[in-house]
Image: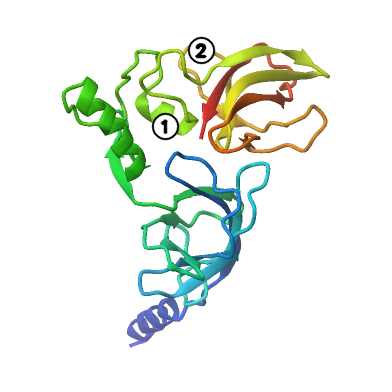
Amino acid sequence: MHILSFLSLLSFSAFAAPVMPYGTYLVKGAFRGDYNTVLRDYGTATVRAQRADGTVIAESSVVSANEEGANFLLSIPVASAATTKSCKVGETLDCVLTTPQGTLDVPNSLTVDTPVRMGSVTFNCTEVKSYVNPKDGKAVKIPTAYVDEVQAWLDVERNGEAYDPWADYDNDGISNYGEFLAGTIPFDDSDYLRVKEFGMKDGKFALKFEHVGGHVYAVSSANTLAKPAWAQRRVRKNANGSELDQVLADGGEGAVGETEIFITPVGNATSEFFKLEAK
């Protein structure tokens, strides 16, 4: 009798365990147009992170893009179990953009992570097509308008060959998807993202490259090129400026110019290798 009562008590206690708050998962995000450019000034709009049933967990006004290319910040409450006002780690939320003209119906989503992290997401403000990378099985979304433009070239030059983001049409060493991210032309072997100058300036590594206006760039580093473990580095737009996760290029959409960014050396590092990436 005592054993049965004890088991019953345990069962009741597990069922009634309180939902414990963990904190807030912050997500900074950006909206992109047809050519992967950040929409700098979207106008009056709100982004909402919500469940499939329409329950809104967090929302944020969309503002002018900052130096990192972010134009909204979602504060998502995280708890040990999902409630009507909080999420659990690993839960997926739909992100919906609402404007005075209506609601954007292009599907975008984010996965809730631990509160100690600052998340970053990019959403498309247009119809997209999904492609799976055969190397890692991960899917990417590319705006339909962009794919249709490249496909028109393929129809003439490649007898209607289907667009493949993982191919390299101009054989410049950059995949078609990489060229989409950087805003370069996928059928021009002289047009690709590359470093123009690299050296030391004001006690920091200075890296200069040709940018395409409206695109976002980041830098990763590794200590060796033999099975490198690339890690994204914080950068600065001037030697003594604030550290940023990534940099939004100056200039109008599609305009070509130069950007110089600075990276603080790692103390006691015997060697460092850097990789410039369009995001």
| Mark 1 crowd level (few <14, some 14–19, many ≥20, 10 Å Cα) | many
Q: Is residue 52 above or below residue 140?
A: below
Element type at mark 1: helix
Give the image location of residue 55, x and y in percent: 44, 75
Give the image location of residue 273, x and y in percent: 59, 15
Reading the image, the residue beneath label 1 is 180
Q: Amino acid at mark 1?
A: Phe
Q: Amino acid at mark 2?
A: Leu
- Along the viewing direction, whichever of 219 and 15 lies nearer the viewer: 219
- Residue 142 shown left or right of residue 220 in the figure: left
Q: Is residue 169 above or below residue 102?
A: above
- Along the viewing direction, whichever of 151 and 140 lies nearer the viewer: 151
Q: What is the residue that sits farthest to the front in this orientation?
A: 156
Mark 2 or 1, nearer chain start = 1
The residue at the point 73 percent across, 21 percent down is: 265
| Residue 26 visible in the snapshot | yes
Give the image location of residue 41, x and y in percent: 60, 53
| Residue 143 visible in the snapshot | no
- Residue 72 shown left or right of residue 90 in the figure: right
| Mark 2 crowd level (few <14, some 14–19, many ≥20, 10 Å Cα) | few
